[in-house]
Image (cartoon, helix red, strand yellow):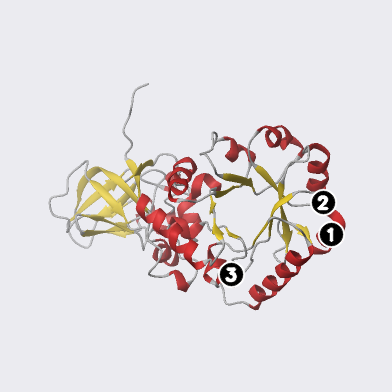
């Protein structure tokens, strides 16, 4: 197979990833610190994320589906993998064969696992106020879980990224579940929940966005490091005379004779049209504002003040997650998970 270089790269900082995990682990008090790997490690590549974090000491990992679990096989020695979406009728073969636990989310899933799980341990999600996945508390406390070997009892915070009274309400509800449902471990806090304090840590935390450079709450500012650095190659440089326009819809007009860098990048790569008007890139410390509209796989930048930039040079995209989220209207989660397969992932 011919190796063809990509005109798009995600430079990924292994040391920053591990440093973020260690900071999050320290905030959780005595709780172990796991890692959410769903959506292919939030777009970084789940297998590589697992490898780096396992080497740093992480032992508990979470994916969304059994297909995601299968893609991680074989697992590193000594790690635990849980599948957050539980077991549907079509999942039982994978659930029996793969060394991973389902997180049971409904009475139906509990019944299915009890009948076909051969007594193997499972995890269980109980809803404490989000009304998404999870058994209702009254069902869980009323005997629906009798006979199960529960490794980890989980719930999920709905408003941890806000100063909401719902946080303390869910904390109290989860404490009641801990007192009423036997399990080896109890887990409530995601990235934002970790920032609420050690009371939310219980036995196991399961951060996601903050591992990958997202800032879930103000308490993480200055501690969480950027992990993902997208870059795009310059396909063409062209001169645009004063008064001419660039791109679809003629949304940008040259106020002077301008030099334009056309990059191999567009909304098909997850760099969406909402970046127009606020996006930008850097070349050797020189700032290049995004001009015109973002096309499917082409985006233009004003390189008039970029000196000796030439075709084939690489532009570093402005991609500080909280800043770009505020400017674009996208969430930090969308900014990460939307970056497409045409980006070559390069760990360094």
Q: First in sequence, mark 1 or 3: give its number.
A: 1
CA distance separating discs 3 and 2: 27 Å
Residue drawn where x is 87% and y is 61% of the image: 142
Frontmost of labels 1 and 3 is: 1
Q: Along the line of sight, which residue is nearer the eye, 229 or 82?
A: 82
In this rendering, would 127 be left or right of 78? right
Q: Position of residue 207 (x, y in %)?
A: 53, 58
Marks 2,1: beta carbons within 8 A = yes
Q: Secondary structure at mark 2?
A: helix
Q: How many marks?
A: 3
Q: Residue furthest right?
A: 142
- Which residue position is annotated with label 1? 139
Report which quarter residue 224 is drawn in: bottom left
Local SS, label 3: loop
**Mark 3, residue position:** 160
Q: CA distance from mark 2 to mark 1?
A: 8 Å
Residue in view at x 61 percent, y 77 percent: 164
Q: Percent from the top left, x then y, of residue 222?
A: 37, 69
Is 337 left, or right, of 139 in this rendering?
left
| Relative image position of residue 158 (x, y in whole percent) | 64, 66
Q: CA distance from mark 1 to mark 3?
A: 25 Å
The answer to whether residue 330 shows anywhere in this view is: no
The image's mark for residue 107 is 2
Q: Earlier in the sequence, mark 3 or mark 2?
A: 2
From the viewer's perspective, is residue 104 above or below residue 186?
above
């Amino acid at each position: 197979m011919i190796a063809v270089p990509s005109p798009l790269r995600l430079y990924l900082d292994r040391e920053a990833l591990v440093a973020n995990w260690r900071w999050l682990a320290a905030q959780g008090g005595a709780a172990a610190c796991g890692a959410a790997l769903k959506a292919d490690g939030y777009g970084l590549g789940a297998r590589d994320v697992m490898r780096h974090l396992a080497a740093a000491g992480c032992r508990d990992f979470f994916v969304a589906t059994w297909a995601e679990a299968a893609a991680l096989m074989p697992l590193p020695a000594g790690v635990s993998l849980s599948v957050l979406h539980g077991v549907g009728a079509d999942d039982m073969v994978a659930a029996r064969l793969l060394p991973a636990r389902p997180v049971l989310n409904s009475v139906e899933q509990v019944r299915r696992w009890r009948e076909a799980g051969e007594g193997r341990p499972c995890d269980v999600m109980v809803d404490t106020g989000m009304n998404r996945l999870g058994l209702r508390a009254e069902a869980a406390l009323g005997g629906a879980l009798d006979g199960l070997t529960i490794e980890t009892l989980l719930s999920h915070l709905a408003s941890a990224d806000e100063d909401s009274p719902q946080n303390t309400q869910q904390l109290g509800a989860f404490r009641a579940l801990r007192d009423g449902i036997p399990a080896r471990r109890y887990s409530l806090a995601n990235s934002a929940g970790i920032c609420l304090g050690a009371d939310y840590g219980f036995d196991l935390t399961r951060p996601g966005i903050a591992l990958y450079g997202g800032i879930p709450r103000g308490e993480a500012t200055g501690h969480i490091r950027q992990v993902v650095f997208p870059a795009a190659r310059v396909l063409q440089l062209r001169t645009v005379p004063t008064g001419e326009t660039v791109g679809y819809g003629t949304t940008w007009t040259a106020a002077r004779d301008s030099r334009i860098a056309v990059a191999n990048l567009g909304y098909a790569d997850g760099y969406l049209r909402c970046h127009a008007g606020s996006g930008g890139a850097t070349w050797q410390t020189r700032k290049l504002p995004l001009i015109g509209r973002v096309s499917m796989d082409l985006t233009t930048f004003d390189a008039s003040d970029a000196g000796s930039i030439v075709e084939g040079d690489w532009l570093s995209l402005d991609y500080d997650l909280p800043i770009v989220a505020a400017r674009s209207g996208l969430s930090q989660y969308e900014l990460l998970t939307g970056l497409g397969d045409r980006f070559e992932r390069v760990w360094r």
